[in-house]
Image (cartoon, helix red, strand yellow):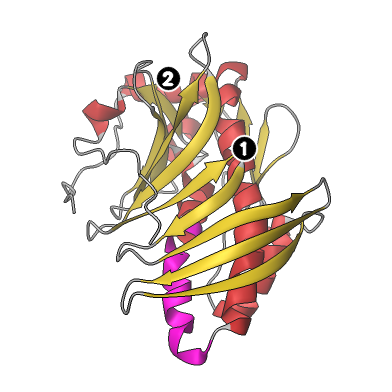
Amino acid sequence: MLTRKTGRTLPREWFSALLCYSLVIAPFGCQLPNGLGGLQDLLDGLGDTGAALFINDDLGSPLLLAAENEDGLSFFVYGTRNAAGDLEEIESIVVREASGAESFVSFVSGRPTHAEAANGSYVHVTYTEVSSQRLSAEIELYNAEDGSQEFYSADIDLQQTADQIAQLVEQVTGRAVQTTAVEGDDIVVKSNSRSQSRVAIVSPIFAIFVLPLVGIVSTMTIILGQVLQVLVLTVVTAIQNIVIGIFTPFFLISELLSASVFNVQSGAVAAIVPIIPPAPVIVLQ
């Protein structure tokens, strides 16, 4: 397991502040009394969530984006780019916790297919029916602690919103899911409750990377949230904690994205995060 260098702080230099201002307008509303009141507001609010989202400018790398917070939680988004160097498809997101433990979620055609915990336990989803309103799926649950495998079926309602799923997940697991949504061609909203709503206006260039990430995480919340509910309510009590552990990347990606999307920067991620994990490889037992 790769370890992580701790004690780093996010850049606070004028150049970074000006770059961030040109890319993402600072959040507005009750958090900033003066609204979008100029550069001083930006400087006061920059990094106020303690997290940042970085767009990798290395066009030859499968690493597209990375996010990190001041507590040492980070994620790394892998996928493909088109001929212009823009994001084409997100294939996986690796999560690294402050302890160095790594887990991941993989996607095919925008749908999550595999969630794997740091200990190797996983849930693998095979879709048997796909429509605009619902999905049918076969679920393989692998418990790395004893090597056992179980199989389940699930029907997934795509008409439910991420907010509704987050509420249901919290009811059955006790763990909160942060939700972030795309509204329009350049608007990202943290919308887990009206009183906590925050808005980011994304520049057209950065929308090419930021909005697809928010969209796929929202889809992940809707699909994996319902899969998690099915498993927690179906499996025996003894392995419910194992199931919830497998979905750790699902919770952590949502949490970190909801904070970092308000502080977007561009650059060589390797210069910011010295130890980058490789893109994950799915190995089924």
Q: Secondary structure at mark 2?
A: helix
User: Which residue is depicted at the point 65% across and 57% down?
Assistant: 223
Q: Is residue 203 magenta?
A: no
Q: Secondary structure at mark 1?
A: loop
Which dot marks residue 120? none
Label 2 sits on residue: 19
User: Which residue is depicted at the point 57% across and 63% down?
Assistant: 177
Ranked by sequence position, the earlier of labels 2 and 1 is 2
Label 1 sits on residue: 109
The amino acid at mark 2 is: Leu
Q: Position of residue 68 (x, y in %)?
A: 35, 44
The amino acid at mark 1 is: Ser
Q: Position of residue 209 (x, y in %)?
A: 54, 27
Q: Tell me the crowding category of disc 1: few under 14, some 14 to 19, or many 20 or more residues within 10 angstroms, Cα based.
A: few
Q: For residue 122, which quarter of the picture?
A: bottom left
Quarter holding the N terminus is bottom left
Q: Which residues are magenta?
A: 236-250
Q: Is residue 138 visible?
A: yes
User: Which residue is depicted at the point 48% across and 32% down?
Assistant: 42
Q: For residue 214, which quarter of the picture?
A: top right
